[in-house]
């Protein structure tokens, strides 16, 4: 669908964005957009949520006769997943090399930084409390003298009870 066609044929926006972004990523980070898009299959869903490939650092070649040396893949990772990523380094290197089609990566460097996209997890839908549950909750926190503390504990209790199944 993304081929060069005459006027009037629709082209997916993702294909156009890939054509624009891929050369920029290759020049600035030495990485292809295909690697970024396939990161979940390469790293696995558990690690892909907390990590992303940042760039590929190719070693400088002083002369054309210098032998080929594999690059370093820099991976941004949140602190809690860094240890898991470190343990699976060998397998990730093999998967990235299989994805690229040659032995391009020799090492991985982990950089700890926030990776999440900024999207907050959706709040779970709470069910309405029954009259008996409301009465039990009010009775439980009723002896607390501080009004603010009592109201906070009542909201907390309503949230806990509302998250449970009836």
Image (tube, grey):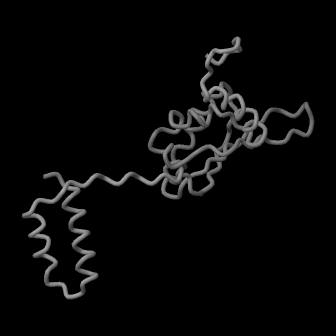
Residue drawn 72% across the image and 38% down it: 25
Residue drawn 63% across the image and 26% down it: 15
Q: Nearer the viewer, residue 143 or 59?
A: 143
- Residue 4 lies in what quarter of the image? top right
Q: Residue furthest bottom?
A: 145
Tag count in the figure?
0
Q: Residue furthest top?
A: 6
Measured from the top left, where is residue 22 in percent x and y? 71, 33
Q: Nearer the viewer, residue 17 or 97?
A: 17
Residue drawn 63% across the image and 54% down it: 111
On the rendered image, what quadrant is the N terminus found in? top right
Q: Is residue 142 above or below residue 46?
A: below
Measured from the top left, where is residue 54 in percent x and y? 66, 46
Residue drawn 52% across the image and 43% down it: 88
Q: Is residue 26 above or below residue 120?
A: above
Q: Nearer the viewer, residue 80 or 154?
A: 154
Measured from the top left, where is residue 58 in percent x and y? 77, 40
């Amino acid at each position: 669908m993304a081929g060069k066609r005459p006027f009037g044929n629709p082209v997916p926006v993702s294909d156009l964005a890939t054509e624009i972004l891929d050369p920029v990523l290759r020049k600035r980070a030495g990485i292809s957009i295909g690697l970024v898009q396939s990161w979940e299959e390469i790293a696995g869903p558990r690690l892909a949520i907390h990590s992303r490939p940042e760039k590929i650092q190719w070693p400088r070649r002083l002369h054309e006769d210098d032998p080929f040396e594999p690059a370093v893949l820099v991976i941004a990772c949140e602190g809690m997943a860094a240890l898991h990523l470190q343990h699976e380094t060998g397998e990730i290197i093999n998967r990235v090399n299989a994805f690229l089609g040659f032995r391009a990566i020799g090492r991985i460097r982990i950089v700890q930084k926030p990776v999440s996209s900024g999207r907050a997890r959706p709040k779970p839908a709470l069910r309405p409390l029954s009259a008996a549950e409301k009465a039990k909750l009010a009775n439980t926190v009723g002896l607390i003298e501080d009004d603010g503390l009592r109201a906070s504990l009542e909201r907390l209790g309503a949230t806990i009870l509302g998250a449970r199944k009836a």
